[in-house]
């Protein structure tokens, strides 16, 4: 087993090309002889500021109670939740500035997590203002499309559910369940709001390059969120990762929720191949029977690969 301390992703990439793809993926993930302290972190979480169930304070307190060393609150297109708890973090835990930004790569809607940025950056705040307007326009378009399917007053209903939070499709889904249009939120996405359905509108977002540049201009690191969630072919996923690296992206999220071990290995290999770091998160929104809880154990990863080592 080989060990590295504070190695660059570029050096590691050059070194591991000696190994076959299968051996490479296995070695990148497993390091039984680690002597450094394991970090329990979570760099992808959501609160009621966007579409989560816990208030920012409740989420941070739960993370602290779970023994998480470092957490980032990454609400969709808003830092309001982070700002509200930035100065009241429980003792012994570090809160990293975070946000999950909506953007566009070609005709595909993509999410990029920003970490460790200056929350007062004028460039970032202007970008967020633009996304706020885009989200409202998208909500109006979703409601118009739903009305053609016989679902009336969806915008008003979704805004009531959002209660001032950054409005998104989950708020439409919850309202549709409440009104009896669908049996549950999954059904709402399957029939009306999911990819390729009438409520799937993603052409209003800024492009990938502009989004990454905004995060970098604010002093942060850009992370490609849940790459496998976009359901791209292998060729298209490789192209996305290459494009992300080309515009200055910093890391790929290799754990999101509860992925299969094979998926983690695949994404770690893709990150190293492109000289990118790796990031991990639960993508926690609410308690669910099969959902991931807060906190990711980073012990399996070799030193020098994690974005958490740069923040």
Image (cartoon, grey):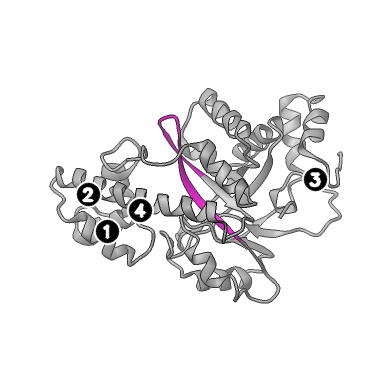
Q: Does the magenta portion include 142?
A: no
- Across and down, in percent, residue 307 comes to 69, 49
- Across and down, in percent, residue 148 comes to 14, 43
Using the image, determine if residue 258 lies above or below residue 273: below
Q: Which mark is residue 236?
A: none
The residue that label 3 is drawn on is 31
Q: CA distance from mark 2 to mark 3?
A: 50 Å
Using the image, determine if residue 311 lies above or below residue 62: above
> The N terminus lies in which quarter of the figure?
top right
Q: Which of the two discs, 4 and 3, labels the residue nearer the N terminus?
A: 3
Q: Are marks 1 and 3 in contact (CB under 8 Å)?
A: no
The residue that label 1 is drawn on is 158
Q: Does the magenta portion include 110?
A: yes
Q: Which mark is residue 143?
A: 2
State the extent of the magenta-drawn residues as a range: 97-111
Q: Which of the two discs, 2 and 4, labels the residue nearer the N terminus?
A: 2
- Across and down, in percent, residue 295 comes to 62, 60
Q: CA distance from mark 4 to mark 3?
A: 40 Å
Residue drawn 73% across the image and 41% down it = 29
Q: CA distance from mark 1 to mark 4?
A: 8 Å
Q: Are marks 1 and 4 in contact (CB under 8 Å)?
A: no
Q: Which of the two discs, 2 and 3, labels the residue nearer the N terminus?
A: 3
Q: Residue furthest front?
A: 122
Residue in the foreground of this view, choosing between 224 and 220: 220
Q: For the residue carrying disc 3, how many other residues have a C-alpha within 10 Å: few (<14), some (14-19), or many (20+)?
A: some
Q: Are marks 2 and 1 in contact (CB under 8 Å)?
A: yes
The residue that label 4 is drawn on is 168
**Does any portion of residue 224 appear in the rendered image?**
no
> The C terminus lies in which quarter of the figure?
bottom right
């Amino acid at each position: 087993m080989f060990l590295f301390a504070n190695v660059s992703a570029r050096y590691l990439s050059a070194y591991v090309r000696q190994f076959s793809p299968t051996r490479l993926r296995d070695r990148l993930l497993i390091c039984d002889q680690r002597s450094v302290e394991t970090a329990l972190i979570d760099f992808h979480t959501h609160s009621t500021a966007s579409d989560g169930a816990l208030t920012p304070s409740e989420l941070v307190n739960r993370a602290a109670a779970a023994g998480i060393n470092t957490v980032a609150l990454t609400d969709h297109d808003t830092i309001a939740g982070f700002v509200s708890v930035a100065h009241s973090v429980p003792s012994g835990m570090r809160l990293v500035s975070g946000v999950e930004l909506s953007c566009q790569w070609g005709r595909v809607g993509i999410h990029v997590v920003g970490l460790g940025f200056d929350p007062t950056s004028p460039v970032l705040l202007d970008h967020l203002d633009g996304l706020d307007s885009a989200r409202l326009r998208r909500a109006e378009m979703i409601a118009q499309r739903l009305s053609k399917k016989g679902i009336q007053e969806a915008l008003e209903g979704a805004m009531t559910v959002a209660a001032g939070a950054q409005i998104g499709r989950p708020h439409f889904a919850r309202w549709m369940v409440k009104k009896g249009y669908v049996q549950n939120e999954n059904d709402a996405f399957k029939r009306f709001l999911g990819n390729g359905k009438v409520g799937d509108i993603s052409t209003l977002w800024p492009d990938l390059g502009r989004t990454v540049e905004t995060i970098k201009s604010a002093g942060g690191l850009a992370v490609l969120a849940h790459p496998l969630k976009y359901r791209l072919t292998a060729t298209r996923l490789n192209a996305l990762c290459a494009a992300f690296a080309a515009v200055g992206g910093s890391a790929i999220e290799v754990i999101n929720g509860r992925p299969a071990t094979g998926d983690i290995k695949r994404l770690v290999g893709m990150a190293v191949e492109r000289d990118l770091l790796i990031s991990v998160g639960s993508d926690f929104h609410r308690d669910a029977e099969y959902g991931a809880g807060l906190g990711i154990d980073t012990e399996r990863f070799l030193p020098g690969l994690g974005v958490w080592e740069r923040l």
